[in-house]
Every structure is written in structure tokens, then in C-alpha cells.
Image (tube, grey):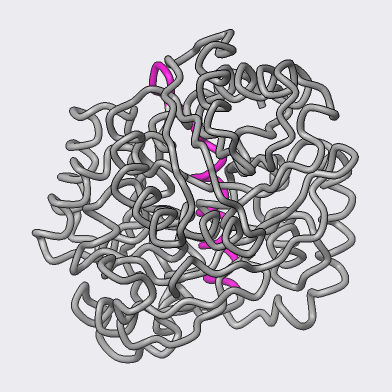
């Protein structure tokens, strides 16, 4: 993926302060097509049962971030479409009926985001799947006020994390709580977060991360890095004065690269914690494998392991969207759509926004697609104060030799 496409995620990172979207760096996915083809043939009988949907279609909205000046994520839409085709051909769609997607591309700016939200209302869809966005504050209120459930894999703001008719399958918006849990386990006394300079990102760190670390008895400091800054040595040096045992790095490619380089130059031995964006191929190339060796990566999906859900993800993509890169951001679209389908598996009779909301609220311990065995329940109890968040675990991996290893589930602090 190009540097421009890495930068398109900056708004998502800013909106959540820890948008832990994906799972792997390029080295993990070089042979992805061959692996996917093998996986598909080996699990066809178990996971491709051929239970086709029939009858009148069920309209489901799909909003993706595409064609914007800074943001374009067509692979997330392609993966959601692949999950839909898979469900229509093998899982009986929703309530036995085929899913008809009503798609809209928004450019990560208010006008197009508002237009897409209004289109969903006008088309009278039964639910809206949003692949990922920093425009949650625009889209979610329009959709939910119309009584339509808003669902997504990764929260883009407080509107979906706390909304009564919003459902966030993963705990990405609260992933800093998992970092706090890890820091506590490692008996760290001080942690510094280096974040790109953005009010939303810094505000979320203040509201979510800081109280969690403080509650654990860990000194927590936040250092902002100007967006696109090629050299953050002064800021990183200032943060290291707190003598941290751990550092969190959040931002787009340039910020990640500059912070990681500065940490190496200044000889820091603090444990680095970060989402996948800071070990992306362009970052890894810029800092070298030594610059990311041992980094703890916190994410919402596992796309490369031999776990059954990861294998299924690659198989579905190989069959229904073979040209889509699977080791990048595509998995958020796949998770967003397939999780909705799984959460409504018990739905029978009429399919309406209300019956979907009831089905999702009542679903318990649903297996998260590509989630390494993580399950979710949308009863509002997963994360205190965040009714819309349905899970309290994330996946933590370690960079070793240029690849992610040792993927494991880790709970949020206090859950």
C-alpha cells in the first residue's frame, strides 16, 4: 500500500486515539494469495456449506471512505462485499433472505458523509455498516435518529461508542485500556504516549488512557507531535525525561517513522506499544527491522495466523475478492459486515431496523470474524460507559524478525 493510503487513516487514528485497525506488516502477507487459495480448498466443506439465501432481499447500507483527497479505502468496501456474497451463498443471508447492499462512498469530509447518511435513510435500509471513518459525528446521528442501527468494526468517535442504536464489534476505541493492562502486568511505573497533534486524538488520550494508567498507579504523560513532522527528536527527548518503561506511538506514517527513529537515536529501551499503522511497510522500510523489533502491536484482527477465523477470512477473500490485499485495512470491512450477519443469525420473520437491533442486543458470545477467538456481546456491558462497544479484548502481537508473532488476546484494564 502506498504512503498516501497510510496517511488516509490519520483521521481515524485521531478520532479514536488508538484506532487499532489491522494486524500485520507486509512481510506477513507476501505469500497471501497462495495461502488463501490453499485455505479455501481445505475448509470448503466446513465453512462453505452452500446454504443459499432466497426470497425478497434485505437492504443493508454500506458506507466506505473512498476517493477523498487524503482518504481512500476501497479495499474495505471490497471486503464487505465479499463477506456479503459469502453469506448470501453459504449462510442464508439474513433471516434466510439475500442481502442487497446499498453502497455509498464518502470522502472523509462533512458534505459527502452527510449525503451518504441521508441516502441510507432515503433508501430505507435496515442497518448501516460503516467500514471505518473519522466522520462518525456526522453519519451516526443521522442514521440512528431515523431508527436505523449503525454498526462498525472500529469506533470512530463517542457517537458510535456510546450510542443506543450503534454497535461497535471490537474494543478499538478503548484499546489504550489493553495497553494499560499490559503495562500493569509488566509492572511499569511510567509510560509516555507520543501522538500526532490533533485535538480529537489528544482529547481521547486524556479522557480514556490517562485515567486508566493513573488508576493503575502508572505515571502517564502525553507528548504531541506535529502532523507530518519528519524529525520529532526534541519532543521525544522531552518525553524521555519522565524515564518511561513504556511508550505508546500513535499517528500516520511520517509521525510514526520520526518517533521510532528518535527513540532509536536517543537510545531508549522503553517497551514500544502501537497500533499496526506504526509498523506498516513504509514505516518498517524507513526505520529498518531493528527499529521495530520487539514492538508490541495491539489490533482488532488476525489475518495471517493458522487460527480458523483467520483462515476463513483469507479463504472468503480468495473466493469472492481475489484481487484485494488481505493484510491491510480490508479486514475492517469484512469484520463489520460478517459480524452483523453472525449477530443476527437467530433472527426470523420480519427484518426491520427494530428486529435487527433486538437481535443484536440479544446475541451473546458471538465469534468475532478474524478475531483469534474473541467473542462479543452487545448488551452494553463490555466496556463501562460505552454502551455501543461489544467487546473487551484486543489482540497483542510482537514484531520479531520483521513479522508479527505470538498473537494473543488481552483484556482491557478493569474488565
> How far from the left and from the top, in percent, is residue 271?
69, 42
Q: Is residue 363 visible?
A: yes
The answer, for residue 324, to whether it is visible in the render is no
Q: Position of residue 411 (x, y in %)?
A: 55, 69
Quadrant where the C terminus sits is bottom left
Dividing the picture into quadrants, the one containing residue 253 is top right
Q: Which residue ends up furthest to the left in the rendered image?
A: 145
Give whichever of 101, 216 is nearer the camera: 216
Q: As rendered, which of 89 and 148 lies closer to the eye?
A: 148
Q: Quadrant of residue 406?
A: bottom right
Q: Is residue 413 left or right of residue 389?
A: right
Instruction: From the top left corner, tell me how far across and down residue 24 is, in percent.
Output: 72, 45
Q: Residue at x 24, y 36 (%)?
A: 113
Residue placed most toward the observer, 19 or 103: 19
Side (left or right) of 160 relative to 98: left
Q: Total marks drawn?
A: 0
Residue 281 against residue 160 in the figure, above or below: above
Q: Residue furthest top?
A: 230
Q: Majority secondary structure of the magenta segment? A: helix
Quarter holding the N terminus is top right
Looking at the image, which is closer to me, 298 or 315? 298
Assess whether residue 403 is covered by the magenta stretch: no
Q: In the image, what residue occupies the spot 87% across and 72% down?
A: 42
Rendered position, 282 above or below 323: above
Residue at 28 percent across and 65 percent down: it is 386
Residue range in magenta is 67-89
Q: Quadrant of residue 405?
A: bottom right
Q: Is residue 306 above or below residue 326?
A: below
Amino acid at each position: 500500500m502506498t504512503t498516501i493510503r497510510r496517511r488516509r487513516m490519520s483521521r481515524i487514528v485521531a478520532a479514536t486515539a488508538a484506532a487499532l485497525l489491522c494486524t500485520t506488516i507486509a512481510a506477513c502477507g507476501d505469500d497471501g494469495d497462495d495461502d488463501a487459495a490453499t485455505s479455501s480448498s481445505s475448509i470448503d466443506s466446513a465453512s462453505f456449506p452452500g446454504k443459499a439465501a432466497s426470497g425478497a432481499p434485505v437492504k443493508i447500507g454500506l458506507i466506505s471512505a473512498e476517493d477523498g483527497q487524503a482518504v481512500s479505502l476501497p479495499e474495505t468496501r471490497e471486503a464487505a462485499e465479499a463477506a456479503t456474497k459469502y453469506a448470501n451463498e453459504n449462510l442464508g443471508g439474513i433471516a434466510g433472505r439475500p442481502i442487497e447492499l446499498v453502497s455509498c462512498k464518502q470522502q472523509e469530509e462533512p458534505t459527502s458523509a452527510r449525503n451518504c447518511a441521508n441516502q441510507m435513510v432515503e433508501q430505507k435500509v435496515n442497518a448501516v455498516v460503516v467500514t471505518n471513518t473519522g466522520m462518525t459525528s456526522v453519519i451516526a446521528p443521522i442514521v440512528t435518529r431515523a431508527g436505523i442501527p449503525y454498526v462498525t468494526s472500529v469506533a470512530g468517535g463517542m457517537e458510535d461508542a456510546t450510542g443506543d442504536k450503534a454497535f461497535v464489534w471490537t474494543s478499538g476505541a478503548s484499546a489504550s485500556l489493553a495497553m494499560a493492562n499490559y503495562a500493569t502486568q509488566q509492572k511499569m511505573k511510567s509510560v509516555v504516549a507520543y501522538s500526532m497533534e490533533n485535538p480529537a486524538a489528544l482529547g481521547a488520550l486524556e479522557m480514556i488512557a490517562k485515567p486508566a494508567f493513573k488508576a493503575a498507579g502508572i505515571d502517564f504523560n502525553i507528548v504531541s507531535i506535529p502532523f507530518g513532522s519528519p524529525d520529532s527528536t526534541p519532543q521525544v527527548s522531552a518525553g524521555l525525561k519522565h524515564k518511561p518503561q513504556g511508550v505508546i506511538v500513535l499517528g500516520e506514517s511520517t509521525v510514526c517513522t520520526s518517533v521510532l527513529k528518535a527513540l532509536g537515536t536517543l537510545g531508549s529501551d522503553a517497551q514500544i506499544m502501537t497500533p499496526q499503522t506504526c509498523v506498516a511497510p513504509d514505516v518498517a522500510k524507513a526505520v529498518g527491522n531493528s527499529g521495530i523489533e520487539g514492538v508490541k502491536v495491539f489490533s482488532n484482527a488476525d489475518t495471517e495466523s493458522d487460527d480458523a477465523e483467520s483462515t476463513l477470512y483469507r479463504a472468503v477473500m480468495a473466493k469472492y475478492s481475489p484481487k484485494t490485499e488481505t493484510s491491510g485495512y480490508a479486514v475492517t470491512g469484512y469484520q463489520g459486515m460478517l459480524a452483523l450477519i453472525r449477530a443476527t443469525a437467530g433472527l426470523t420473520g420480519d427484518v426491520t431496523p427494530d428486529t435487527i437491533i433486538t437481535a443484536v442486543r440479544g446475541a451473546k458470545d458471538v465469534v468475532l470474524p478474524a478475531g483469534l477467538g474473541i467473542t462479543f456481546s452487545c448488551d452494553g456491558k463490555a466496556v463501562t460507559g460505552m454502551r455501543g462497544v461489544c467487546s473487551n479484548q484486543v489482540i497483542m502481537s510482537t514484531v520479531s524478525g520483521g513479522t508479527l508473532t505470538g498473537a494473543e488476546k488481552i483484556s482491557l484494564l478493569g474488565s
